[in-house]
Amino acid sequence: MILYMDRGQVPDPEALSADALRWCIRKAENANRRFGRLERYYRGDHDIFHRTAEQDEVRVGVNYAKYVVDIALGYYLGQGVKYDPNPKAWRQGGERTLDLTPLLRCYDAQHIARTDREIGRTMGVMGECLELCYASSEADPRPRSAVIDPRCGILVCDSSVEHQKLFALIWDRRETPGGEGYYAVTCCTPYTVREYRSDTLDAAAFVPVGEAVPHYFGAVPVIAYENDPLRQGDFEQIISLIDAYDELMSSRLTDKRKFVDALLVFYGMTLAPGEEDKLAQQRFIDGAPLDARAEYIQKTFDEAGVQVLANALVEEMHKQTLTVDLSDERFSGNSSGQALKLKLLAMDQMARNKMGQMEQGLRERLGLYNHWLTVKGEMSPVSAEDVDVVFTLNLPVNEGEQVELVTRLRGLVDDQTLLGQLWFVKDPAEAVRNLRLQQQETAARSREDRETDRAEEQNGAGQKEDA
C-alpha cells in the first residue's frame, strides 16, 4: 500500500523511529481487511459460503471476479512488453547512440514478462501492487525484481504534490519454533536496506538486525503500480452484483433439488405400516380403492423469468467492468472487423488506461536497473525518455493482411516502425540492425563477385592475345 507522511516527521530515513514504524504497520493491518476480501473473491471464496446454510440449500459461487481480471490481463499483457530506443536515441546517420543490451539481458534472465503479468494480476485484484528491485545472491550479483503483495509492502511518500519517496517497508508477522510471534520488517531507503524486528506493536522498540547494506539503485528500490487513480480492483465495484448472481444461482439450484424431492399425496386411502418402504423400493402399491388417487405436490417457478434476471446481472457486470462477454453469441456472429473493433472499444480504452498506469512503473524500473548497471560499469547512463515502452494488445492476427500492410507502407514509414507491426518480430531495433548488416554483406558479396568476373574476363583476354 502507499502512505503519505510529512517530510519533517522523517528527518533521517536511515534511522527511523519506532513510532513511525508502528504507525505504518498499523495502517497496513487496517487496510489488509479490504485486500484480503478482494483476494478471497478472486480465489472464488465468496461471502455466500460464509453464511449459515439452511436445510437442503445449495450454495454456488460463480467466479466472475477471476474472469474479469484474467481477461483484461491477457488482453494487454498476453504478449511481453518491448523496450525500443525512440528516434531521439539514433544519430542522423542511423547509428544507435545507446545500447540496452545489458539491461535487456537482465530482464531475459529472470523472465521479466512473467513478473509483469503477476504485477498486472495483483493490480487487477487489489488495485495496486509493489515491486522490489534487489541484487541476486549469485557470485556475480545481478539486478532482479520481485512482486510484493500490497498486504506485506508499504511505500511511504512525502505529502508534497510530487509525492517523492521517503522509504519503503516490507513486513510480515512470523513465528519462532517455540510459538512466539514477532514482526519482521525490511526497510529500504534511497541508499541502504536494513532489517528490524519487534515482538509486538504495543510500545515495543524495533531492534535493528545486522548492519545496513547499500543497494546501489540510486533511489528507493520499491516501485508502486496503481490500477487506476482510485486504486480499485477490476471487480471491486461489482462485488454486490457477484453476490446477487451467486444468490440467484444458489436459489435456482435449491429449487431444483426441492422440485425433485416433491411430496406424494394420496387421496381416498391410507398406507398401511411398512408400505412406505415398499413403495420407495418397488415403486408399486397394491390394494388401492377404485376411487383413490395419488399425485405429487411440486413447487412451481418461472424458469424463463429467472434466466432473464441472470442474463441482466451478467450484462451489467460486463458493462460495469468494461469487459466483453466472449461467450455471447452476439459478440462475433457475422460481424465485420470494424464492427468487432467497436464492440471492443470500451475494453480497449480500459486496457490503455491500465497500460498508461503501468508504463510509469516500468520506466521507473528501467531507471533503477540502469543506475545499478552504470555503477557496476556495465552500461552507460540511459534516460527513460529515450526508450519507448511498447505494449502489444493480444488480439487474433490476420497474418496476410498485416504483411500486405507493411509491404505497402515500405518507403513511407521507417523500417523500425514497420517491423514493429509484425507479430513475430520481438525486437524491431535489432531486426533493423540485422537487416542493414545483411544488406551490407549482400552488397559486399556482389562487389566480390563482380571483381571476380572482371578478373576472369581480363585473364581470358590476356590468354587470347598470347595465342
Image (cartoon, rainbow, N blue to C red):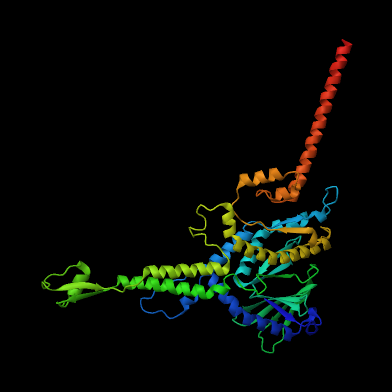
For the C terminus, give its image quadrant. top right
Residue 201 spot, x, y in % from top left: 67, 86
Which residue lies at the image location 72% right of the left edge and 51% below the top edge? 427
Q: Is residue 31 above or below residue 62?
A: below
Nearer to the camera, 377 or 121? 121
For the N terminus, give its image quadrant. bottom right
Q: Is residue 310 above or below residue 341?
A: below
In this picture, residue 101 sits left or right of residue 48? right
Which residue lies at the image location 62% right of the left edge and 58% below the top edge? 78
Nearer to the camera, 307 or 192? 307
Which residue lies at the image location 60% right of the left edge and 76% below the top edge? 35
Residue 62 makes an appearance in the image: no
Residue furthest out toward the bottom: 203
Q: Is residue 156 above or below residue 454?
A: below
Question: For the image shown, how many numbered marks are present on the structure?
Answer: 0
Q: Is residue 143 above or below residue 29?
A: above
Residue 55 makes an appearance in the image: yes
In this picture, residue 464 sits left or right of residue 295? right
Residue 62 spot, x, y in % from top left: 48, 69
In this picture, residue 105 sits left or right of residue 306? right
Residue 194 spot, x, y in % from top left: 75, 75
Residue 150 spot, x, y in % from top left: 65, 74
